[in-house]
Image (tube, grey):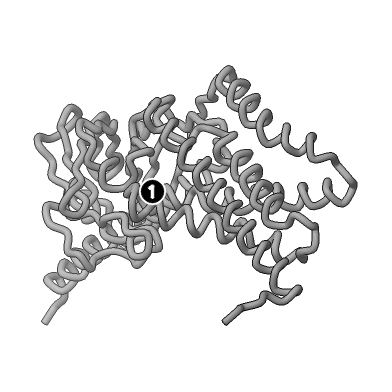
């Protein structure tokens, strides 16, 4: 029995094959570049590499559209969908087989999608204007090489960043102080519901244990079951101020959250923090938590947005734990002092 392909079916089948070839080629290029960056340890990872973040996805999506729409017959919807599909496939492979962290993929995806749209629609406009195939071929080959070489010669800026969160607590500075200093046991349900902890999966604080007292003491913070780091106390004014320098003596935070984002690495240095405790009224106190870090990437504005979100969630959660505990202590004090 013979099976004949209808004239309308043959172009459609060729289009599907061409699209599959385009995606396969783009994925091979993407993961080849990823592995080269990872093996080279050039600065630690993709995160400080502007051309990998913005230029590469634009070119890959343009390549897919170039191969997948050879006769220029596809609608604009095709060009909108290609970056979404590519990023979805890349994320799935990276998470499943390369064991990339959720934070890495979340930071990568929005800019890859936006860049992919730019690349796809730029190609579409060029093809409509009649750009030659030779010009497009040379662009795919030459632009990434030039961009990588140029960016390697551009120094990365070192930008100090201050992230601040505050909360009002129905308690006195003296009642707040012990919980600002240490909390040897923190329950899993204490604090706030946050996207960072409850959706993305960054572990919640489990304990903060102070060894010693005053300037020079060392506090160890424990997050979940796998993360710990130290804070070396640099200021100690009971009821007013507590300040520290972070010390990441092991890689537990990086290992658990994302291997490409070290808290004391080439692209990011989480430097110091402090609590400022200020009375507002007789039994209302404001406590402010500051975290200082240095952003060292070619995409600092983008990196700072994620820092504001992730570290901001973390600070809000820590302040909520202190607030709940201090207010409970204040209520117990009021109950003891209330006449029967």
Report helix, strand or loop for mark 1: strand
Residue 132 higher or lower than 67, as above or below? above
Counting from the top left corner in percent of width and height, residue 194 is at 38, 63
Instruction: Identify which residue, 259 or 39, lies in the foreground.
Output: 39
With 310 as the anchor, is 337 left or right in this view? left
Say which residue appears at 70% left-offset and 59% top-offset.
79
- Location of mark 1 (residue): 288
With 227 as the anchor, is 83 left or right in this view? right
Counting from the top left corner in percent of width and height, residue 89 is at 48, 57
Instruction: Identify which residue, 87 or 264, lies in the foreground.
Output: 87
Counting from the top left corner in percent of width and height, residue 81 is at 64, 63
Say which residue appears at 90% left-offset and 47% top-offset.
129
Query: Visible in this render: residue 22?
Result: yes
Label 1 crowding class (10 Å Cα cut-off): few <14, some 14-19, many 20+? some
Residue 186 higher or lower than 209, as above or below? below
Instruction: Identify which residue, 93 or 242, lies in the foreground.
Output: 93
Residue 66 higher or lower than 5, as above or below? above
Query: Visible in this render: residue 282?
Result: no
Say which residue appears at 53% left-offset and 40% top-offset.
29
Quarter of the image that includes the C terminus: bottom left
With 233 as the anchor, is 44 left or right in this view? right
């Amino acid at each position: 029995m013979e099976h004949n392909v209808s004239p309308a079916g043959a172009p459609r089948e060729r289009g599907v094959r061409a699209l599959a070839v385009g995606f396969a080629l783009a994925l091979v290029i993407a993961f080849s570049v990823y592995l080269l960056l990872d093996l080279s340890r050039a600065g630690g990872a993709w995160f400080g590499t502007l051309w990998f973040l913005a230029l590469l996805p634009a070119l890959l999506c343009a390549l897919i559209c170039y191969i997948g729409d050879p006769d220029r017959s596809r609608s604009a919807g095709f060009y909108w969908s290609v970056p979404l599909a590519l990023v979805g496939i890349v994320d799935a492979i990276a998470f499943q087989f390369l064991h990339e962290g959720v934070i890495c993929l979340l930071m990568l995806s929005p800019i890859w999608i936006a860049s992919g749209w730019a690349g796809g629609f730029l190609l579409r406009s060029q093809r409509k204007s009649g750009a030659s195939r030779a010009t497009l071929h040379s662009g795919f080959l030459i632009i990434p090489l030039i961009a990588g070489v140029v960016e390697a010669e551009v120094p990365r800026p070192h930008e100090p960043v201050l992230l601040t969160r505050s909360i009002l607590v129905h308690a006195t500075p003296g009642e707040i102080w012990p919980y600002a200093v240490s909390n040897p046991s923190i329950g899993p349900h204490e604090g706030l519901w946050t996207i960072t902890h409850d959706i993305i999966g960054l572990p919640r604080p489990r304990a903060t244990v102070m060894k010693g007292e005053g300037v020079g003491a060392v506090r160890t913070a424990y997050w979940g079951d796998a993360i710990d780091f130290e804070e070396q106390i640099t200021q100690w004014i009971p009821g007013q101020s507590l300040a520290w320098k972070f010390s990441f003596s092991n890689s537990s935070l990086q290992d658990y959250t994302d291997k490409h984002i070290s808290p004391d690495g080439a692209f990011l240095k989480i430097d110091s923090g402090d609590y400022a405790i200020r009375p507002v009224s007789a039994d209302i106190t404001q406590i402010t938590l500051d975290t200082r870090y240095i952003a060292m990437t070619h995409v600092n504005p983008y990196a700072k947005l994620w820092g504001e979100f992730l570290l901001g969630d973390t600070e809000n959660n820590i302040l909520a734990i202190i607030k709940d505990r201090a207010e409970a202590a204040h209520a117990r004090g009021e109950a003891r002092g209330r006449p029967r």
